[in-house]
Image: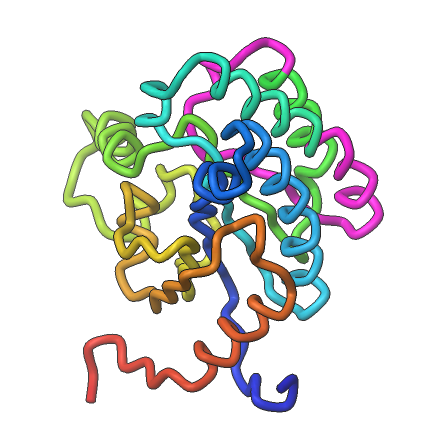
Amino acid sequence: MEEEISVLPKHVGFIMDGNGRWAKARNKPRTFGHQKGADVIYEIVSACFNRGIEAVSLYAFSTENWSRPREEIDKIFDLLRRFLKKYSATLLREKIRLIISGDLSALPDGLREECERRIGETKAFSSHTLNIAINYGSRAEILRAVNLLKGREGEVGEEEFSSCLYTAGLPDVDLVVRTSGEQRLSNFFLWQCAYSEFYFTEVLWPDFHEKQLTDALVWFSRRKRRFGGV
């Protein structure tokens, strides 16, 4: 099916849903599902960049996820820290820039320090960008941008507003992929997804592999994107 992918998105966002349900179906704790889901991230991110996609955004932990059990939260943070440490060699070798969307101040010291270290190491890279949304909510991001713009004289345009978002400099999200059958944005990059194509699949995130990615990209390449035109 490779030949069917005539147009690639520049920026793909993944709402990685279904880890808990995947684990429950196997009579395992939810944390086991998060572990399996973390293993998939490396495969999918690498596959995207190998295909020539410029930017990948991962919805890893939302501002609403703080309501989950503490054990689960700690496991997610530990898995994110381990992923960044494991993926660091790839970031440097492949010249992939890492950015983090979200408020890092509330994160555990180990995860926050790992984020800051990898962001600093890769900030000069420009060919590919991995954007991980941690402690992120789009409404909070928009309010943050508004507050950053307070006191500015004159009318604020879209470009100036976009420059105050965590994703400043990145193209808008062309394709949003949400796994597990849920069909909602869940506060994911509302501004950046204004003209995104939305691909919903019943596949749970731990079962989402390169074949499923190919299916999503083939679907995207067949879409007629008009951006409000005819």
Q: Quadrant of residue 39?
A: top right
| Residue pictured at 47% horizontal, 30% vertical | 134
| Residue pictured at 61% horizontal, 29% vertical | 80
Residue 164 in the image: state x and y as whole percent.
35, 37
Part of the protein shown in magenta: 84-110
| Residue pictured at 32% horizontal, 19% vertical | 67
Q: Quadrant of the C terminus?
A: bottom left
Residue furthest top as drawn: 109
- Between 12 and 124, the residue placed more toward the observer is 12
- Between 153 and 108, the residue placed more toward the observer is 108
Q: Answer left or right for 140 relative to 45.
A: left
Q: Residue 107 lies in magenta, yes or no? A: yes
Residue 166 in the image: state x and y as whole percent.
42, 37
Residue 221 in the image: state x and y as whole percent.
47, 82
Q: Quadrant of residue 48?
A: bottom right
Quick check: 151 above or below 204?
Answer: above
Q: Answer left or right for 108 relative to 93.
A: left
| Residue pictured at 55% horizontal, 41% vertical | 26
Tag count: 0
Q: Quadrant of the N terminus?
A: bottom right
Q: Residue 104 lies in magenta, yes or no? A: yes
Residue furthest left as drawn: 155
Q: How is the image coloured?
A: rainbow
Quick check: 201 above or below 137?
Answer: below
- Between 30 and 78, the residue placed more toward the observer is 30
Residue 174 in the image: state x and y as whole percent.
41, 65
